[in-house]
């Protein structure tokens, strides 16, 4: 990124490329001090630091700290807030999710149209720690933060003694990804209340917490020192000092507080509280606006443009606008990696004068790609607002429409898939699109987003030839992960349940197995090889993080992995690792012996084990946040139990219910509260109406106090249809459909979705070379 500072206003020589979906770019540069309001639809995408869609982030629009609109990102990381009433000159959003620094983005709104925003949320996992008594310096790349001794208090002001955990990030202004995680925009308010535009020399983002994750503060009368490296490309015009600015979440804007002084190639300043701190030079403001076109006159929507340190997006007509500081010459560019290969000739922009509004000649893309057109419709075949998702080569790209109609520029000669969601969460089935030649249009017609109301009893998801060993449903039941083997390879594959479309696949060794999803379904943990756990994006197959471990589980927020060493016979040790960077966050004090089997997670902060001994079953639950034992119960007088992953027992997805079968009495079983060990069912459950040789086969337990079981003969040859019962009274609730030509088929490895709406089972097959093998997924409620 190149910057040149001018001491006088130069003649107007400018070709600018920027983007903020504005057809009639506003000229009001007063920060909306006149208070005028407009209506717009705010839509956008939220990613994590690896570039993967971040589901489950809460996006809000606020006024004076009061939330006016709120929505949660979906599995594609996208969101839409229709008809938002916002200030005419500038609007902002806040994005929050556990395990991440708060994100924010501000844009000039587009009246009556879509105002699109993109941002990246950074992990707030612990990166450093210091002792409260001694303080110390922590390095974040070439930046650093120095904490004084005895300077920490709790949120209530009580002196804190102990380990201080620090989450810290440095945003380098010369990095192409700098603005992706930048809060708000470059607009700031000075001490005197006036507004200004900033040129950033770097941002330090810091959170401090105690060992239990509670917020800490700097004590009154104490200060911490922030030190920013001065980039080589910015040294020539760097001033001797400049203000420090912190991000005010109520204003959605940077506020001046303190000063940073230059020493050598560093700036340093003192602060009394922690948030995002920006080391910036302020200046008066100008505005540039223009249009991005293809074929001379056709405006191109959704182009992500870098304007100096800012990034903005073209609207549905190809228009953009951007506030910029005066007296600054800057470069304009389009990163093809952020624009599906689209690019234009880089442009050097000369400085603007104060309050100048400059209209830029149209920017012509170097090549015009193919086009996809269509219309999103609801269950009544009426056009509806929503999001179109284009996927190819393992990546996703979102486009937004308020009318339902869309025209999207896409890469030529690349096959892709189109999906759609409506503003209220209805979904459409994926549509395969063949490779399209340059400059040609492909119409997909109408896309019916009405799949949420499907009444299908089941879906058979085919994985070709081979044998599935284990399966896992995503929390909402929309995705199915299949792990198994074929004659020449072992595999793990992810499928869309309703369409059967394979989303991604991995070729792995035979020790690989499935662990769990994050609560929002955006991340999947699998055992990788003989000694590693790997976090992947189940939609694309992208590897997010890999750590050495015998076993483990992904925390519900997807930010951490609880890993196990010494598994299963040695004394087991537990540690927590960051998904963001793979670093160890902390070791836990867990140190238990026995043949412990990892059951999974219970609730939001506990990991659960079971030890099935000869005469009893022991269940241990450990809180990995507070590092304390929650439960250690023994269910006595049982000769033996199967493993929780075996045929005769099962735990519910949330870990609260254990269904256990006595090995010596294979026709009966009981269900237990895993915290207290108390029996939940009124009497031991057994299959009635079958021959005396029948026994319980595979069992699956749901979170909603129901379970599935299939009765088989004791030689494993005959079988009844899998059936669902209520746990409390053992009453039959539903018999699940199976193929009439395969009435003797045995289903195994039953797996419920977390919401208890879907149930998957693997039909047993004898021949791994069978050309079409499948997993059945039933819709059970």
Image (cartoon, rainbow, N blue to C red):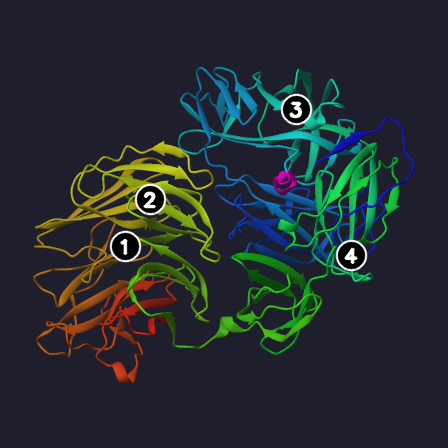
**At x 19% / y 57%, what residue is drawn?**
679
Q: Secondary structure at mark 2?
A: strand
- Label total for image: 4
**At x 80% / y 35%, what residue is drawn?**
329
Decide whether residue 182 is among the magenta residues.
yes
Q: Secondary structure at mark 4?
A: loop
Give the CA separation, mark 2 to mark 1.
Answer: 13 Å
Residue 663 rendering spot, x and y as whole percentages:
10, 60
**Quadrant in the picture for the N terminus:** top right
Q: Which mark is residue 230?
A: 3
Question: In this picture, which residue range is highlighted in magenta?
Answer: 176-183
Q: Is residue 500 left or right of residue 748?
A: right
**At x 30% / y 50%, what residue is drawn?**
600
Q: In this orientation, does residue 382 appear? A: yes
Give the CA separation, mark 1 to mark 4.
Answer: 57 Å
Which corner quadrant of the image does residue 192 belong to? top right
Estimate how packed mark 3 is, as few (under 14), some (14 to 19) or many (20 or more) residues with alpha carbons within 10 Å.
many
Q: Closer to the camera, 588 or 528?
A: 528
Q: Which mark is residue 532?
A: 2
Give the CA separation, mark 3 to mark 4.
Answer: 40 Å
Q: Which mark is residue 111?
A: 4
Mark 1, residue position: 510
Give the CA separation, mark 2 to mark 4.
Answer: 51 Å
Of the image marks 2 and 3, the number of the one nearer the N terminus: 3
Disc 1 and disc 4 in contact, CB within 8 angstroms: no
Residue 298 rendering spot, x and y as whole percentages:
79, 63
Of the image marks 3 and 4, the number of the one nearer the N terminus: 4
Give the CA separation, mark 3 to mark 1.
Answer: 50 Å
Q: Secondary structure at mark 3?
A: loop
Q: Secondary structure at mark 1?
A: loop
């Amino acid at each position: 990124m190149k910057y040149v500072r001018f001491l006088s206003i130069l003649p107007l020589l400018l070709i600018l490329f920027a983007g903020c979906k504005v057809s009639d770019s506003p000229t009001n540069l007063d920060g909306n001090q006149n208070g005028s309001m407009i209506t717009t639809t705010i839509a956008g995408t939220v990613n994590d630091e690896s570039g993967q869609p971040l589901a489950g982030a809460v996006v809000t629009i606020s006024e004076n700290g009061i939330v006016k609109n709120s929505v949660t990102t979906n599995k594609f990381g996208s969101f839409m807030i229709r008809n938002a009433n916002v200030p005419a000159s500038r609007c902002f959003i806040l994005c929050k999710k556990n395990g991440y620094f708060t994100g924010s983005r501000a844009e000039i709104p587009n009246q009556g149209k879509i105002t699109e925003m993109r941002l990246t949320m950074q992990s707030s996992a612990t990166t450093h720690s210091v002792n409260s008594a001694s303080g110390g310096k922590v390095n974040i790349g070439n930046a650093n933060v120095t904490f004084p001794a005895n300077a920490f208090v709790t949120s209530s002001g009580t002196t804190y003694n102990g380990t201080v955990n620090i989450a810290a990030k440095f945003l380098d202004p010369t990095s192409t990804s700098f603005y992706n995680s930048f809060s708000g925009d470059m607009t700031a308010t000075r001490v005197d209340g006036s507004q200004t535009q900033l040129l950033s020399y770097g941002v330090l983002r810091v959170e401090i917490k105690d060992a239990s994750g509670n917020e800490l503060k700097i004590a009154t009368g104490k200060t911490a020192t922030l030190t920013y490296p001065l980039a080589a490309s910015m040294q020539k015009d760097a001033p001797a000092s400049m203000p420090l600015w912190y991000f005010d979440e109520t204003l959605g804007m940077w506020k001046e507080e303190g000063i940073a002084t230059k020493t050598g190639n560093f700036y340093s300043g003192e602060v009394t509280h922690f948030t995002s701190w920006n080391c910036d030079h302020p200046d008066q403001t100008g505005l540039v606006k223009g249009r991005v076109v293809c074929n001379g006159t056709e405006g191109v929507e959704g182009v992500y443009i870098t304007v100096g340190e800012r990034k903005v997006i073209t609207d549905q007509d190809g228009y953009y606008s951007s506030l910029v500081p005066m007296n600054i010459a800057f470069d304009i560019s389009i990163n093809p990696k952020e624009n599906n290969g689209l690019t234009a000739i880089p442009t050097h922009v000369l400085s603007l004068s104060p309050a100048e509004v400059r209209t830029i000649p149209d920017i012509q893309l170097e090549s015009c790609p193919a086009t996809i057109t269509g219309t999103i419709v609801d269950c009544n075949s009426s056009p509806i607002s929503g999001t179109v998702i284009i996927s190819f080569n393992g990546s996703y790209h979102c486009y937004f429409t308020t009318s339902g109609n869309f025209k999207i520029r896409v890469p030529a000669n690349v096959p892709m898939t189109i999906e759609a969601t409506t503003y209220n969460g209805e979904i459409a089935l994926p549509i395969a699109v063949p490779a399209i030649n340059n400059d040609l249009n492909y119409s997909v017609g109408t896309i019916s987003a009405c799949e949420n109301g499907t009444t299908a009893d089941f879906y058979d998801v085919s994985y070709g030839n081979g044998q599935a060993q284990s399966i896992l449903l995503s929390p909402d039941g929309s995705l199915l992960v299949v792990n198994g083997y074929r004659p020449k390879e072992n595999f793990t594959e992810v499928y869309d349940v309703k369409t059967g479309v394979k989303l991604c696949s991995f070729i792995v060794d035979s020790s690989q197995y499935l662990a769990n999803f994050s609560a929002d379904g955006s991340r999947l943990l699998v055992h990788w090889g003989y000694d590693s756990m790997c976090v992947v994006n189940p939609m694309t197959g992208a590897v997010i993080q890999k750590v050495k471990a015998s076993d483990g589980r992904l925390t519900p927020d997807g930010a951490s992995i609880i890993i196990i060493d010494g598994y299963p016979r040695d004394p087991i040790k537990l540690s927590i690792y960051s998904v963001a960077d793979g670093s160890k966050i902390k070791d836990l004090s867990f140190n238990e012996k026995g043949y412990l089997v990892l059951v999974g997670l219970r609730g939001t902060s506990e990991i659960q084990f079971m030890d099935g001994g000869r005469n009893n079953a022991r269940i241990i639950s450990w809180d990995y946040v507070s590092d304390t034992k929650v439960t250690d119960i023994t269910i006595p007088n049982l000769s033996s139990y199967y493993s929780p992953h075996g045929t005769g027992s099962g735990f519910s997805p949330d870990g609260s219910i254990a269904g256990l079968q006595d090995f010596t009495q294979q026709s009966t079983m009981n269900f237990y509260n895993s915290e207290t060990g108390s029996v939940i069912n009124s009497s031991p459950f057994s299959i009635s109406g079958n021959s005396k040789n029948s026994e319980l086969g595979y069992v699956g337990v749901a979170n909603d106090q129901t379970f599935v079981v299939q009765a088989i003969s004791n030689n494993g040859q005959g079988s009844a249809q899998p059936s669902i019962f209520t746990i409390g009274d053992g009453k039959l609730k539903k018999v699940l459909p199976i193929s009439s030509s395969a009435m003797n088929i045995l289903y195994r490895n039953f797996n419920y979705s977390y919401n208890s709406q879907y149930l998957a089972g693997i039909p047993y097959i004898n021949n791994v070379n069978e050309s079409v093998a499948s997993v059945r997924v039933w819709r059970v409620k």
